[in-house]
Amino acid sequence: MTVVPMPREKGRKLIAQNKKARHDYSIEDVYEAGLVLTGTEVKSLRAGRANLTDGFATVDDGEVWLRGIHIPEYTQGTWTNHEPRRARKLLLRKEEISRIIGKVKDSGVTLVPLALYFHDGYAKVEIAVARGRKNYDKRQAIAERESKREAERATGRRTKGID
């Protein structure tokens, strides 16, 4: 009797996204990091349950930690269930950590999680080195995006012969 291994997941399966982060911050650099999770956290994530809105990352003693992310308890879990808002260690290369440390030393710069997903079966988080935007910067970014969209519409109409 031969044992046939189960096929691994391929591709990227999105769990949670922080859409507000792209609005509230101007993104400078984006990094993909692995997460150190417990078994019930992984099961809860596979069920598609997570919240990134209050999340942020910190650098402590040369390690990057993800804080404020809410992964609810696994419903079928027992006494081994995890704490929903615990700090989770991020897995990054030393060069990436030193680059992040150099950038976070500037004032007004923070680490923000953008997305939480499975990549080829492994839980990953996309974190960004971001600078906070003021309200007028947000309005200006919206105006630029809408003017760009309108220009694309106009060129699309012109190429189709509709005016």
Image (tube, rainbow, N blue to C red):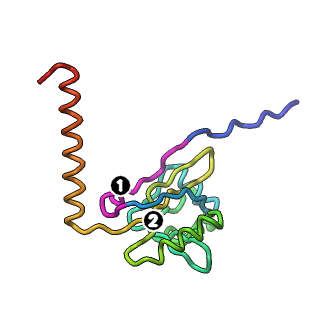
- The quadrant the N terminus occupies is top right
Q: In this rendering, which labeled residue sits more in front, label 2 or label 1?
A: 2
Rounded to the nearest angstrom, the CA distance separating label 2 from label 1 is 15 Å
For badge 1, the amino acid type reads Lys
Whether 16 is among the magenta residues is: yes
Seen in the picture, residue 71 relative to 9 is either above or below; the reply is below
User: Of the residues under marks 2 and 1, which one precedes in the sequence?
Assistant: 1
Q: Which residues are magenta?
A: 12-26
Relative to 64, is 19 above or below?
A: above
Residue at x 76%, y 37% (from the top left corner):
5
Q: Please tell me which residue lies in front, 38 or 88.
A: 88
**Looking at the image, can residue 75 be seen?**
no
Q: Are marks 2 and 1 in contact (CB under 8 Å)?
A: no
Q: Is residue 95 left or right of residue 52?
A: right
What residue is disc 2 on? 129
Q: Is residue 136 left or right of residue 23?
A: left
How packed is label 2: few (under 14 Cα within 10 Å), some, or many (20 or more)? many
Residue 101 belongs to the span the image colors magenta: no
Q: Which mark is residue 19?
A: 1
At a point 22% along the width and 53% down the height, the residue shown is: 142
Q: Quadrant of residue 62?
A: bottom right
Q: Which residue is nearer to you in this view: 125 or 41?
A: 125
- Kind of residue at disc 2: Val
Res. 76 image quadrant? bottom right
SS class of the residue under badge 2? strand
Asked whether 25 or 41 is in front, the reply is 25
Q: Is residue 154 visible?
A: yes
Q: Which residue is at the far bottom?
A: 61
